[in-house]
Amino acid sequence: MANFPSLQNVFTATRNTIQRFPLETIATLAGSVFAIFLVSKEYGDPNTAFYTKAILSSLLCLVAFLSVSLYFSASRKGYMYRLLASFILGGLAIAFVYSFEDDISEVEAQQFVVLSIALHLLVAFAGFIPKKYHQEEFWEFNKQLFLRIITAGLYSNVLYAGLALAIVAVKELFDLELNEKIFGYLFIAIAGPFNTLFFLNGVPEIQNSKNTLALSYPVGLKKFTQYVLLPLISLYLIILLCYEAKIIFTLSLPIGWVSYLVLVFAIIGILSFLLVQPIATSAGNLWMQTFNRWFYYLLIPLLGLLFWAILYRIYSYGFTHERYYVLLLAVWLTLLVLYFLGSKNPKIKFIPMSLCFAGLFSLVGPQSAHNISKWSQMNRLTSYVQKLKTQKLTTAEEKNMSSIVDFILTNYAAEIVLPVAKDQLTALYSSQKKPTSTEILKALGVQYHMWNDNSSNYFNYAYPDSDSKYIDNIQGYDISMVVTQDAVINCKNCLNLNAKNYSFLTEKKDYGIDLTINNETIALLLNDFVNNQKQFDNTIEKQKKITQTIDSKNYQITIIYLEIDGKISDNKKTINNFRIKLLIKIK
């Protein structure tokens, strides 16, 4: 007869988990409550930024608190020390998140991900800092954590799918009106409290005499590594070594994205190395023995390729946040190779420890990714401004300068550009708080160019207010409508003005579209207009509204271009997609 866990056992396990991890539970509940608030609010709510940052803070605090709990559990120090350390780490995490702008930028999101990864890595070794290190115990602890994450994710997904289907069934079968946000609330309840408490319940105790961390190696893990990961590594290795041989014999430069392929190889290889570590020296595991012995030697030529690719990009275009992290990982991998090849008894905890410290190293201080990228691009901009004093820039240099200004305005305050060329920019900054790239470069006497290797083959335009301007003043006009390249308007007698019915029909043509109002067809010559207007060129930043006026027998039509893109061939533009607004005045 099957044995099912009683509610009493569930309550007991939940209570024990909460007692063992009280701060982690509070962080989980706080994040879940703020997530529910966020889901319940309407789009554009002024508190959205606050709720978003509260959720991100809760996520970081949860992981930070768990690291502290594992450390003090292993060290057996007083509970007050644990609380104090948790509050300090949690306060720093909250301050870090709330330093972000309300509209979190891509770089700030990147910083959050790096800190989150660093804190997760801290969980892997925090409990082994205050105690004597045992390799097998460390491996077993992290294996159990890894399997618990997978199990918690599986349970949570199945539970959510089942309950969501039950809600749909009740809604359809009993014809109930249910708020669609109920699915968001359900997801939060399962992904938050349920998933987290389920995971925390399975976190192994490091200093537990009753349940020691004895090595237990799953057979499935060996087969997964041997028959999936190792063949993948071999494939990547062959490709990369052949490519490296090619660029050496042809004396060519490596393409930029090869560095990402080397990093993927290294990550999969290190994961495989960690997975097979307990049995790598066992008899009968020839594949494992060979891989364990040669992996770090095979990394050496690929590290050369990685440094060659990333240093060339940095030399040519300076540091960005992405290039900084690629170089940082290259340095980290080099230290890893030196450590494992030079140490007689290497400890695998060096891998998460060193990567955790590398992540923290990149976040704060003058050596951080943010500051190094700023310093590098500002130096490049200064060199171009100095060169402008003696000679005119080439198109390639103007393109580089455009990308630098775009990068600075996207990731930093516009004010930092002013000191570089104070004489030329003072008037512009006096009239505008946030000048655009085009305006800054124009003040410096430089033409703006979009940074796109294929920009000469394509064009695109987007009116800045096209996504947010839903209410218009159409005084002087009678009708307003939005037309796209795919949506056909075909309505009969759908509008009544001054006791007269109006019908509308749009039809796509090679030259644009035909607009039929009642019995009159008006040709909207979009192609000719786009080809005659320089404002659609890629060399001009899109800021100004572009309008086109067409007169017919009974109507005056003003076309406002909201979005448009297409191809350029033989200096002729061909429209692919468009979205336009028509303002129609009846004569």
Image (cartoon, rainbow, N blue to C red):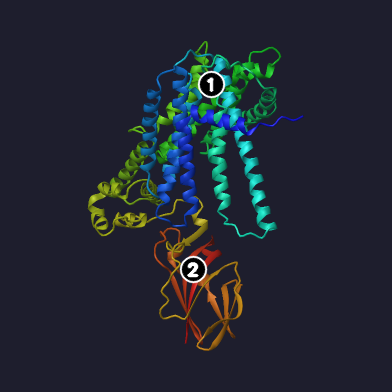
Please state which amino acid type lies under the numbered disc 2. Val
Q: Quadrant of the N terminus?
A: top right
Look at the image and tell me whether residue 43 can be seen.
yes
Q: Nearer the viewer, residue 224 or 561?
A: 224
Point out residue 428 in the picture as x, y percentages from the top left corner: 27, 57
SS at mark 1 in the image:
loop
Q: Separation of disc 2 and disc 1 at Cα?
A: 69 Å
Q: Is residue 353 above or below residue 535?
A: above
Q: Position of residue 403 (x, y in %)?
A: 40, 49
Q: Residue at x 55, y 32 (%)?
A: 14
Instruction: Tell me if label 2 and label 1 are in contact, CB under 8 Å.
Output: no
Pointer 1 local density, CA inside 10 Å: few below 14, some 14–19, many at least 20: some
Dot 2 alpha-carbon crowd within 10 angstroms: few under 14, some 14 to 19, many 20 or more:
many
Residue tagged by mark 1? 205
Residue 114 can be seen, yes or no: no
Pick the residue in front: 549 or 137.
137
Q: Position of residue 372 (x, y in %)?
A: 36, 36
SS for callout 2 = helix
- Residue 334, percent from left and from top: 48, 23
Task: Give the residue at the far front of this rendering.
Answer: 8
On the rendered structure, is 310 left or right of 491? left
Q: Is residue 250 above or below residue 550?
A: above
Q: In front of the other: label 2 or label 1? A: 1
Is tag 2's residue or tag 1's residue first in the polypeptide sequence? 1
Pointer 2 residue: 530
